[in-house]
């Protein structure tokens, strides 16, 4: 990946142009070409505008030129709003004239089918040849509220209010709705960028730009699908973790349900859906995922205007008990703490609070609280080391000095000792106070839950920033052995390799298996069992049988040579009866494992992100309970620990009802070894280890079953 620290000059030409040619400028009111020029003029753009229209001497009083070649000066940015069939030729002309960036507003490309896709490929070839930074096609355009630029290169939207929130959207329609929403709620933006079809510039390019943009404090993303998931992961991790210039990234990902997903045979494959992979991506990159557009901007207001809390302890100040309880409940539900006041009576005396004021937390100043009472309590809490953030609630009552209370909150927030968020409930009575708070940079929400969730998002980002940094562990393994096994083995029609080969592959990477052997006859099985030690399990060995239990291909707890011979015969008969066309290669004889917690570990290779690692509750109910977590390989050591913590089975591993804690460190090592296997053996498409038996702390783990599906060299599964 190119170093994102070096922001490309062509992106500056796109977002900070000194000159613009509008190709398709129109004299016809309310057409796209007319609206684009109107917005450029009305926004106060500080550069030079060159309308291009072969049929007009001037457009909107600005001299026009027949073609881009007729423009007498250098052009940084071309905005193209002509019919789609004409766009490639126009873009080619721009390249010949040395135009460094272009926005193709026009639709009619890959979104319309094969003909449009061919047209879009032509655009890609042109921008590669000339080195043009292309935004679009089929996009709304861009806005830059920097006073030095003042650019509104969109159609149909008034200029956004200046602020420090950068917004990148893959949907032009959503972009338009967001612009209307932010204006209505007085939310300031630094940049607004509609990606369109991403034939040139992608979200990764723009993320790198916004990272280094001094006018942007927080980055918002609306994502339908990433162009390069692995590159995004690497860059977003750097942005959110930068020790000198960290910026929070908030993302709204559309498409949580994967309709029409292909059928997969492994548990890992069936569980690793698109949304689960994006969830893992955001976790690993420190990106905060939100569920709604409203949350996206309500959280952003807090990030853009308040300091990041140094912890998760919240003091709630209210003049009504109910809203305070609602706020406290939401705080706790989202991982925040609401600790009690350390010295309530001292606090009461300090602020002359009435005897019936509630001094636990929430701190209920009761209904007759005026601005002086709020001022004293807020000041005391700002200096109290027991709290990291303040949530100020106000419910309007007739005798309250509402706007004076708002000024108290504003003055406290301006000291920037701790983050302060407010909730002034209501609409009409508190309207002017809310406007004053928001204008002063104090996030003010309509309901207590919204304020609490915003603080929780900030605390989550603080935890990410303060996390211990761990690197990648590499183990001494028999990589060449595993590669040879995978390349020399013929998979089944389902793509799976024989289980004994799968065992040897994971053994080559140091994953601990229970002692095992392959037996081709009843006598071989009895001999192997005697050497391994009783009791043993017998499992059918066949490339054509995926689910062994379903056909009676497993016999457990076999405790004598005679019983082993009988078990072998029973499995052979079951195969003949229930899978008559299947190849029967004998059985795997394996020592029975002792009692342990059953986990599942897995790999699923994703076309966009590469190998995905899974861990969770194992056994026969994997897909029923779906208690699993995912990460993109390679794994850092801390990521492996966090994966386990995300699952409910983590509670069992810690030990409950007198049970000893499990050997979590051994599980983590297995995950890291599996991650190395996934990265170093790209022919593996899917892998399940189910179950992995986890024994008490210090006693390790044992792999019981392994299934590996591989792909052909050209990338298709067999």
Image (spheres, helix red, strand yellow):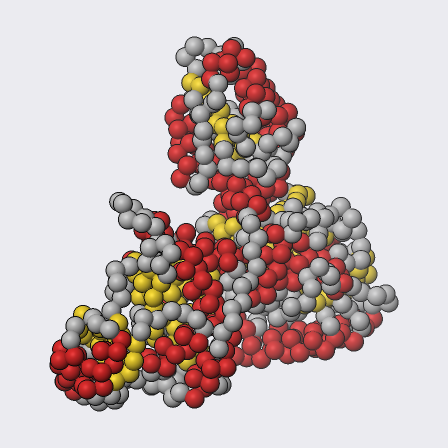
Nearer to me, 90 or 640: 640
Q: Quadrant of residue 91?
A: bottom right
Q: Is residue 568 above or below residue 17?
A: below
- Say which quarter of the image contains residue 231: bottom right
Q: Nearer the viewer, residue 427 or 484?
A: 484
425 vs 546, left or right, is right
**Quick check: 178 left or right of 580?**
right
Is residue 275 visible to the viewer in this orientation of the structure? no
Residue 311 visible in image: yes
Decide if residue 463 is on the left or right side of residue 130: left
- Residue at the image position 68 percent from the left and 43 percent from the top: 162
Residue at (65, 52) in percent of width and height: 242
Q: Is residue 172 left or right of residue 523?
A: right
Q: Which of 348/197 is in front?
A: 348
Residue 340 lies, in percent from the top left, at 44, 25
Relative to residue 311, is residue 250 depicted above or below? Answer: below
Q: Position of residue 348 (x, y in %)?
A: 49, 13
Where residue 546 appears, as percent x and y from the top left, is 28, 78
Instruction: From the viewer's side, name the closer residue of 225 and 611.
Output: 611
**Where is the C terminus found, in terms of image quarters?**
bottom left
Identity of the residue drawn at 65% across and 68% down: 1
**Residue depicted at x 42% and y 64%:** 670
The spot of residue 306 in percent (x, y) is 61, 37
């Amino acid at each position: 990946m190119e170093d994102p620290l070096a922001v490309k000059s062509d992106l500056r030409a796109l977002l900070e142009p000194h000159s613009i040619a509008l190709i398709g400028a129109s004299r016809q009111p309310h057409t796209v070409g007319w609206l684009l020029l109107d917005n450029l003029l009305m926004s106060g753009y500080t550069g030079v505008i060159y309308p291009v229209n072969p049929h007009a001497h001037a457009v909107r009083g600005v001299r026009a030129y027949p073609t881009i070649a007729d423009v007498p000066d250098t052009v940084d940015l071309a905005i193209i709003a002509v019919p789609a069939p004409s766009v490639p030729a126009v873009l080619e002309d721009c390249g010949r004239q040395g135009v460094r960036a272009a926005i193709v507003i026009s639709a009619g490309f890959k979104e319309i089918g094969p003909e449009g896709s061919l047209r879009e490929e032509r655009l890609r070839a042109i921008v590669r040849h000339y080195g043009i930074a292309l935004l679009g096609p089929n996009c709304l355009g861009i806005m830059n509220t920097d006073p030095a630029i003042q650019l509104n290169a969109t159609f149909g939207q008034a200029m956004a209010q200046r602020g420090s929130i950068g917004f990148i959207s893959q949907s032009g329609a959503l972009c338009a709705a967001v612009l209307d929403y932010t204006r209505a709620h007085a939310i300031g933006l630094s940049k607004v960028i509609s990606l369109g079809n991403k034939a040139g510039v992608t979200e990764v390019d723009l993320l790198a730009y916004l990272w280094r943009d001094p006018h942007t404090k927080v980055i918002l993303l609306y994502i339908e699908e990433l162009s390069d998931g692995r590159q995004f992961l690497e860059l977003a991790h750097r942005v959110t973790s930068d020790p000198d210039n960290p910026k929070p990234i908030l993302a709204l990902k559309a498409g949580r349900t994967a309709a029409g997903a292909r059928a997969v045979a492994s548990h890992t494959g069936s569980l690793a859906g698109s949304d689960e992979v994006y969830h893992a991506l955001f976790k690993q990159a420190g990106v905060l995922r939100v569920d709604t557009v409203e949350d996206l901007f309500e959280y952003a207001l807090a990030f853009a205007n308040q300091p990041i809390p140094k912890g998760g302890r919240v003091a709630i100040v209210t003049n009504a008990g109910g809203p305070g309880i609602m706020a406290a409940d939401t705080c706790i539900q989202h991982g925040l703490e609401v600790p009690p006041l350390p010295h309530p009576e001292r606090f009461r005396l300090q602020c002359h609070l009435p005897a019936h004021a509630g001094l636990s937390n929430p701190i209920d100043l009761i209904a007759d609280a005026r601005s002086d009472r709020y001022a004293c309590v807020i000041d005391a809490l700002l200096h109290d080391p027991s709290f990291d953030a303040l949530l100020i609630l106000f419910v309007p009552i007739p005798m309250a000095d509402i706007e004076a209370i708002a000024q108290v909150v504003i003055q406290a927030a301006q000291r920037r000792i701790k983050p302060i968020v407010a909730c002034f409930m209501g609409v009409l009575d508190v309207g002017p106070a809310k406007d004053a708070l928001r204008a002063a940079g104090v996030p003010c929400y309509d309901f207590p839950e919204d304020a609490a969730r915003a603080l929780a998002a900030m605390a989550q980002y603080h935890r990410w920033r303060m996390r211990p940094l761990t690197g990648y562990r590499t183990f001494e393994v028999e990589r060449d052995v595993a590669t040879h096994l995978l390349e020399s083995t013929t998979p089944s029609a389902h793509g799976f390799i024989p289980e004994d080969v799968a065992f040897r592959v994971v053994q080559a990477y140091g994953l601990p298996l229970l002692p095992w052997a392959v037996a081709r006859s009843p006598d071989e099985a009895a001999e192997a069992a005697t050497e391994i030690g009783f009791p043993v399990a017998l499992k059918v060995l066949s490339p054509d049988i995926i689910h062994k239990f379903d056909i009676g291909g497993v016999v457990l707890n076999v405790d004598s040579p005679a019983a082993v011979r009988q078990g072998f015969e029973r499995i052979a008969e079951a195969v003949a009866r229930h899978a008559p066309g299947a190849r029967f290669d004998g059985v795997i004889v394996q020592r029975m494992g002792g009692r342990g917690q059953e986990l599942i570990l897995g790999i699923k290779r994703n076309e966009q992100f590469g190998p995905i690692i899974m861990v969770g509750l194992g056994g026969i109910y994997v897909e029923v309970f779906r208690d699993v977590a995912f990460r993109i390989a390679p794994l850092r050591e801390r990521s492996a620990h966090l994966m386990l913590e995300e699952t409910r089975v983590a509670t069992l591993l810690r030990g409950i009802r007198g049970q000893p804690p499990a050997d979590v460190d051994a599980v983590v090592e297995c995950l890291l070894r599996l991650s190395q296997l996934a990265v170093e053996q790209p022919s593996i498409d899917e892998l399940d280890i189910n179950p992995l038996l986890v024994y008490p702390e210090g006693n390790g783990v044992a792999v019981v079953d392994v299934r590996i599906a591989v792909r052909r060299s050209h990338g298709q599964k067999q």
